[in-house]
Structures are given as C-alpha cells and as structure tokens.
Image (cartoon, rainbow, N blue to C red):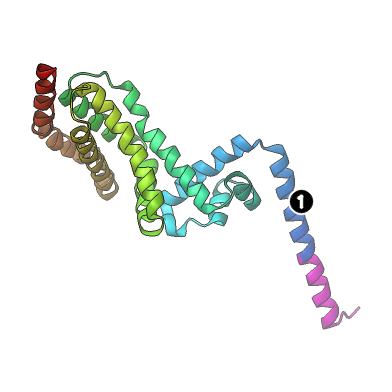
Amino acid sequence: MIIGVDALCTLDSVKLATCRVRRRTKEVDTLAHVPTADRSVQILEAAVRVIAEHGVASATTRRITDAADAPLASLHYCFRDKEGLFRAVFENLAAEATKPFALIELGDLEATATDLIRHSGRWVVEHPDYALAQLDLYLWMVRNRPALAAESYAVYLRAVADVLQRAAGSSARAESVESLASVLIGATDALVVQWASHRDPARVQAYIDVFCAGIPAMCTGIQQSAKSGEHVG
C-alpha cells in the first residue's frame, strides 16, 4: 500500500499530538500523587544542584524540573514562577547555612566570632553545592533583582548579628556588631571561592586560621565600648 505525503504528514501530526496528550496526562497524574510540600522540596534540591553545576543563567525551569524528575507544571504550581523559586532557594540555603549557629556555645565576642567562622568553613566543605549555589544566586540577584538581593542579605546579616550581639552583650553598639557581622559574612563568601577554586580542605583551613588570627583586633573596640557602657550604667 502506498501512502501519500499528505497522509504521512497527517499521521505524524496525530502521533505528535498523542505524545503531547500522554505527556500532559502523565504530568497531571504525577501532580496528583505527590504532595505539594514534597514536590517543593524536590524542586528546591534540584535547583540547588543545577545552579551549582551550570550557574543561575543556565538554570532553566525545564532543566530544574528534569533534574527533579518532576513535570514542568509543578514548578509553577509550587512557586508561581522562576523568580519565586530562586527566592525560595536562597532563603532555604540561608537557613541551611545558619543551622550550625545553633551548635555554637556563646562565649565572649571574640570566641563566638571565631566559632562562627570555623563552623561556616566546615559547612562550606561539607555542603559545597549549597555554598556555591547560594553565592551564585546572590550575585545573580544583585545584577538582576537588586531589591531582592538587599532584602535577602539583610535577613542573613541579621541572623549573624543576632548571635554576635548576644555574645557581646546588650551594651555593645548594635552598629559596630553589625559591621563585624558583615565582615564575617564576607570572609565566608571568600571561603566558598577558595573551595570552588581548589577543592582543598587544607587550603580552606589555612585561610580560616589566618582570618581568625585577626578576629581579636576586630573585636577589641566593640568589647571596650561595651565595658564602658556597662561602667557608665
């Protein structure tokens, strides 16, 4: 039997349409069987892997959902759009990065600042994908969503400053403590670059040791002003 060109084209069109219907049906079935909370976690984790491996610019919604083994529609269902996803990813990464803070036993300001850096260094080495994705995502926000970048940074800065303020005492100037927190965050970002460049824990540790040697000088002024405030009070 000879089939004409028009008939072949029609058959191809039918096959293509059938594939699309099956794909949409599969996506609906998948959406129906996976709880939204679980699907959100899957997509968040996949986004971190994709950003760490390919960078934010190449983190397309299709690439992320493929990495999550999830239908594309689920991303928009869980996060509305890619910007909403990126914001959720950054907030999740910031929460992960500050988890080690709960393990810190508050001492004086110097000891607490040192512990913050050492805990952050261990976190970077143990969670390199998270650390790299967080830094890359933040730089993307600075270039493309500056207001969101400022808001996200403020949240992370507040988390670090709160730990330091408790160690320094209520009489320590909040502005000075926040400045120290900003310096420590910058050092943590440098740790990510160190690790990404060499993947050498020994180099990261050497950087931490050098930086921590300078922490006493950073804390002296804050501690002296806190003692003066207590004396005046």
Q: Could one spot residue 216 in this view of the protein?
A: no
Kind of element beneath mark 1: helix
Instruction: Identify residue for label 1.
Output: 25
Q: Which of the 4 image quarters holds residue 157?
A: top left
x, y (%) of residue 101?
32, 26
Residue 103 left/right relative to 111: right
* Front position in the image: 139 or 156: 156
Q: Vertically, is 130 above or below 14?
A: above
* Majority secondary structure of magenta residues: helix
Task: Looking at the picture, tell me which residue is in the foreground, 134 or 173.
Answer: 173
Q: Is residue 10 visible?
A: yes
Q: Is residue 208 magenta?
A: no
Q: Is residue 5 magenta?
A: yes
User: Image check: 51 left or right of 66?
Assistant: left
In x, y percent, where is residue 114?
19, 28
Q: Residue at x 77, y 55 (%)?
A: 22
Quarter of the figure with residue 127: top left
Instruction: Please state the extent of the stretch shown in magenta in the rendering.
Output: 1-16
Q: Amino acid at mark 1?
A: Thr
Q: Quadrant of the N terminus?
A: bottom right
Q: Position of residue 144 (x, y in %)?
A: 40, 59
Q: Is 128 drawn above or below residue 102 in the view shown?
A: below
Q: Is residue 145 above or below residue 220?
A: below
- Residue 140: percent from left, percent from top: 38, 55
Residue furthest toward the front?
233
Depth check, front residue: 92 or 62 = 92
